[in-house]
Amino acid sequence: MIFKITGAILIVASCSMGGALYSNIYINRLENLKAFSICLEMLRSEIAYTHMTLSEASSIIGQKTDGPVADIFTEFSCILNLKKGYTAHIAWEEALNKNLEWLDFNDEEIELVKTLGDVIGTSDTVNQEKSLTLLSKQLDMLVEKAAAEKDKNVKMYRNLGLLGGLGLAILLI
Amino acid sequence: MDTYEDILNGLSISLREIIKKYVDTSTWGGLEEIRIREGRPLMIINRGTDMMLTSKGFTTQDNKRAYTVSHKDMVETLELISESSIYAFQDELKNGFITLRGGHRVGLAGRVVMENGDIKTLKNVTGINIRITRELKGVSDKAIDYIYRPPRGVYNTMILSPPMAGKTTLLRDMVRNISNGGPGRPGLKVGVVDERSEIAGCYNGIPQNDVGVRTDVLDCCPKALGIILLIRSMSPEVICTDEIGRKSDIDAIEEACNAGVNIITTVHASDIEELKRKSNIAPLIEERLFDRYIVLGTSMGRGTIEAIYDGMLNSLIDAPMRSDCQ
């Protein structure tokens, strides 16, 4: 009997953990989207007020923030500093691809962050500000969407994990 | 070799491969300019001779064999020159040039956008000219004896020459020489107003050329404003600036002289007669504001000092001379 009880507890615990881990994708994604939004705002400020070059601005953003989004900006700055002839577009895409798996972004979100590489550094301050503001607005909409999905799904997957584990344990007993 | 890398870093991948190949088969030392014009052959100027380059990096005089610069080359080169940050160089774009690390000047041509009568920016850049800067330390060693005023000072000096005869190079070395001092010659505090980043070749505000230990540089600053600013803020003993000509420049120079600061400057003119014909400069000669006029030419090669005159326009040397550089 003791084995059955131990086994049941292990099943419930592992299923709950599975549900919790899966639900973490939604939490992580929202956090990264918010972090991206903050980094974009920092980049806008650096461009508009200090006129720093992209590599300098990205390096500072990488230092001031944490997590995978910070890693992308740091990587971007490093690639630009290598002076291998990469344009900002290519450097951004490369930095993004290296860190994409840690972001938990869906296709729509990936496409949006990729578009930063299309606009960054190619125009004067006023147009850079306009482009980054537009991108920020689009990102804010995705943040709202991701927050709603998180609220809906996190609880659901956690409960599903727990209940699934309980169901399985009952069946096996 | 660092300076060579600085230039390659500003070129698109295909252009940098061609220049690399050219340098492998030729000499880097003589290269003066790289001219990139969209839809036209890639050209270089080496020791005063212009040549086209093939895609293999060989020189040619045949248009058809030369590498034709593509739109992609132009866009990528402009992006790399500006470190992928056009916004950070918008003031430089207005002036039509960007300075690379190493002090090399990149001139730009394209479509000018005007706003309220002023140049707002430059777009559709279709011509890029990379002028390779080389410091020639020691070129002013002979001239410095003629402009030094014992016990501690220099004469107000004007260097005149036609374009590409070496007046900026001479001025740059004079700045270094005056600032560092020499045997029996104390170093002086020098202020440089470097409107076009040619003297000090500042990159991110740091002089890339050796301008001496007692030199302060106002980079990308209009001459007239810069001269006044330096007098107020840095108490220089000598102010050096390049290519004066506007009325406002002359007024600022007069103000500096009245403040007891010595001036060394350059002017586009082949000889004293041409200088006298310049309406803004002529009064300065009459007023004897300048004590020395150094005329440069090319009789013994670029940078030859053809003549040195005093304020009364009496010649101080019998024959042209040149200093050996390090």
Image (cartoon, helix red, strand yellow):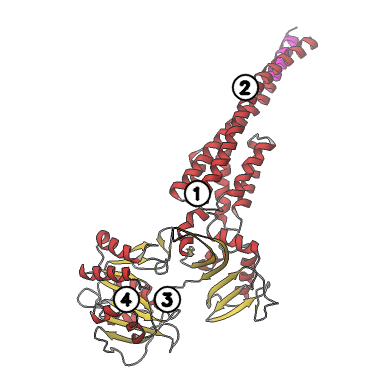
Q: Secondary structure at mark 4?
A: loop
Residue, disc 2: A151
Q: For the point 53% across and 40% down, which residue is it?
A: A39
- What is the x, y in percent for residue A35? 55, 35
Write down the chain letter for disc 2. Answer: A
Q: Which residue sits furthest bottom?
A: B318
First in residue order: circle 4 vs circle 3: 3
Write down the chain letter for disc 4. Answer: B
Residue, disc 3: B136
* Distance of label 2 from label 3 (alpha carbons): 69 Å
Residue type at mark 4 is Asn
Write down the chain letter for disc 3. Answer: B
- What is the x, y in percent for residue B326? 42, 78
Q: For the point 25% across and 80% down, which residue is it?
A: B291
Q: Which residue sits furthest front?
A: B116
Q: For the point 57% across and 65% down, which residue is it?
A: B8
Residue, disc 1: A126
* B29 displayed left or right of B220: right
* Distance of label 2 from label 1 (alpha carbons): 37 Å
Is A119 in front, or is A6? A119
Tag in front: 1 or 4: 4
First in residue order: circle 2 vs circle 1: 1
Crowd band around label 2 with a 10 angstrom C-alpha radius: few (<14), some (14–19), many (20+): few
* Distance of label 4 from label 3 (alpha carbons): 31 Å
Is A16 in front, or is B10? B10
**Dot label at residue B280:** 4
Q: In the picture, residue B171 is in which quadrant?
A: bottom left
